[in-house]
Image (cartoon, rainbow, N blue to C red):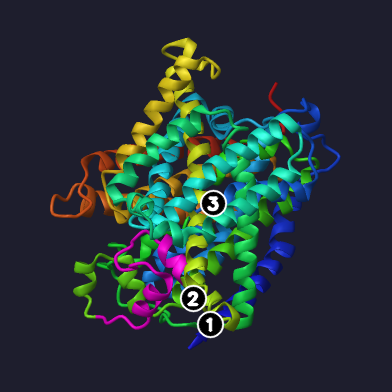
Amino acid sequence: MQHALTFVIATLCILTICYRLYGVFFVRKVLNADDSEITPSHILEDGKDYVPTKKWVNFGSHFAAIAAAGPLVGPVLAAQYGYLPSFLWLLIGCVVGGAVHDTVVLFASMKHRGKSLSEVAKAELGPVAGWCTGLAMLFIITITMAGLSMVVVHALERNPWGTFAVFMTIPVAICVGLWERYTGSMRGATWVGIIVIFACVIIGPYIQESSFGEWLSLRASTVSLVLPFYAFFATALPVWMLLTPRGYLSSFMKIGVFGALVIGVVFINPEIQFPAVTQFIHGNGPVLAGPVWPFISITIACGAISGFHAFIGSGTTPKQIDKWNDILPVAFGAMLAECVVGVMALIAATSLHPADYFAINSSPEVFAGLGMSVVNLPQLSESIGLDLYGRTGGAVTLAVGMADIFTRIPWFSHLASYFFQFVVMFEAVFILTAVDSGTRVARYLLQDFLGDIWPPLKRTNWMPGAIGCSIVACLLWGYLLNSGDINSVWALFGVSNQLMASIGLMIGATIILRMSEKRWYVLTCLVPLSYLYVTVNYAAYWMVKNVYFNSAAKGFNIFNGTISIVMVALGLVIMVASIQRWFVLWRARGNDEPIELLS
């Protein structure tokens, strides 16, 4: 049997070496980052969006923005294939793909004064590619909201304790926001907010046994309807009232939970009970229907390589970088840190017995067909105080795995239910924070696109346009949420997300061809791009053929299949535009003038 500590030490050592060698080489040699050049945060400093910020503060905010639920859930779902495929993809995908993608996208956006990736694509590849990139960004935001929300659905269904704790974070965050708004002090509000959130978890058992708890014991279909309804109000409220304070409070939870998990793994050093590979690597698994390739690479996105990071890398972060070499810790370093989060989630899942894992992550009917017998799940269900069978989506599995590790510490052995519910709240709050901001971004994108038809919509402060586009955004991802299972929706999210990452690498390759001293440096982007582009297109083809357009499949959905086809078509248009541009740059033999910052 392998032990968890081996994976933790190997991960930290490998990523540290890669940061010191490949990261420094990529930033200083390939991108030729020069601190003597002024960054956009100084050129356009306005005290609001463009603000020079210290690199480690930037690192913290950037990491908090990119490390949402993806690195928690993806590795848990991919554990179906065994620990080895997931572990290898996390490390290789992160270093060769994800860290390069995040760094080059941030660099490209800074070279264009902090513009969004669609604007960068328009400047580098032409208006058609820019328009296709913007539309792809709208698709990925919509699909991401559905995929992440489905994780919350399965974590809160029939779980009044967790539902109460998660619901209470809303008024707590609003009170913290109001306190800071009208007193100008965040310190006192922060301590009160954290204490109240912990209190909500502690009093959960009393709520669960009450009549109020019975009212909060919601079915999955009910939670699926409530989430888009909630998202509308969260999007319509000012950011300082809910989105910002809850994200701020959740950052403390993130640091605390994973710090505790690392300590628990070091002291307990649990056995990895999963084999290196399982019998499901060829497909027909109870969690993911497809084979290990390409599904390992679309199931684990965040933690390895994620197109969603392009929203952050071409959003707020490039407007705050103080010096050009700060992108090494901020972008490259934050991606490596997220890989560590993904590895810890994988450890939590694979430390469970495989039969217990599959009993949680598949329906009772499917699990019965596997011919497995649960080992520790009855005792875990009893100690946690919740029926754990058939709670698909990954969030419950992660919470069970983490609670199991924590309760192996003798003086914590009787606190399994509290650990479980706290981790469920931790996951749900993270996801809902992403849903708040993601839905708001989708609203902005809709206003931008529809504003070309009706100009008033381009004004983000025009209330009728903001409300109307918010409703449309919630309806779009709400429909996806209610139209499939975790298998089909998460695969749809994975395909769109990794296609977005491919687009980021296409733009990165173009930037490198234009600016690098040696043209072969473009291989830093072309190598991961070649793998990812082939993988994501084959995954889309597999899902369309075997699931979305297959009437006999559980995830049969013409709408989802059509979205997949549209996404692939958009990616193809951008790829053709990129190749044409690469030929032009290659024939120029590196004589093009360096990119100037856009006016």
Q: Along the line of sight, which residue is nearer the eye, 384 or 593? A: 384
Q: Are marks 1 and 2 in contact (CB under 8 Å)?
A: yes
Q: Residue at horizontal 61%, vertical 38%?
A: 175
Q: Along the line of sight, which residue is nearer the eye, 516 or 467? A: 467
Crowding at mark 2 (Cα within 10 Å: few <14, some 14-19, many 20+): many
Tag 1 or tag 3, which sits nearer the N-term? 3
Label 1: element kind = loop
Q: Residue at horizontal 59%, vertical 70%?
A: 261
Q: Which amino acid type is shown beneath numbered disc 2?
A: Asp
Residue 220 in the image: state x and y as whole percent.
30, 51
Of badges 3 and 2, the one in the foreground is 2
User: In the image, which residues are magenta?
Assistant: 372-400
Residue 394 in the image: state x and y as whole percent.
40, 62
Residue under label 2, please give it: 404
Tag 2 or tag 1, which sits nearer the N-term? 1
- Whether the magenta-drawn stretch holds residue 135 is answered as no
Q: Residue at horizontal 32%, vertical 78%?
A: 355
Residue under label 3, please give it: 68
Q: Is residue 426 above or below residue 507?
A: below
Q: Are marks 3 and 1 in contact (CB under 8 Å)?
A: no
- Whether the magenta-drawn stretch holds residue 392 is answered as yes
Tag 2 or tag 3, which sits nearer the N-term? 3
Q: Along the line of sight, which residue is nearer the eye, 583 or 49? A: 49
Q: Left of 3 or right of it: where is 446?
A: left
Residue 541 in the image: state x and y as whole percent.
28, 50
Residue 270 bears which disc, if any? 1
Q: Which amino acid type is shown beneath numbered disc 1?
A: Pro
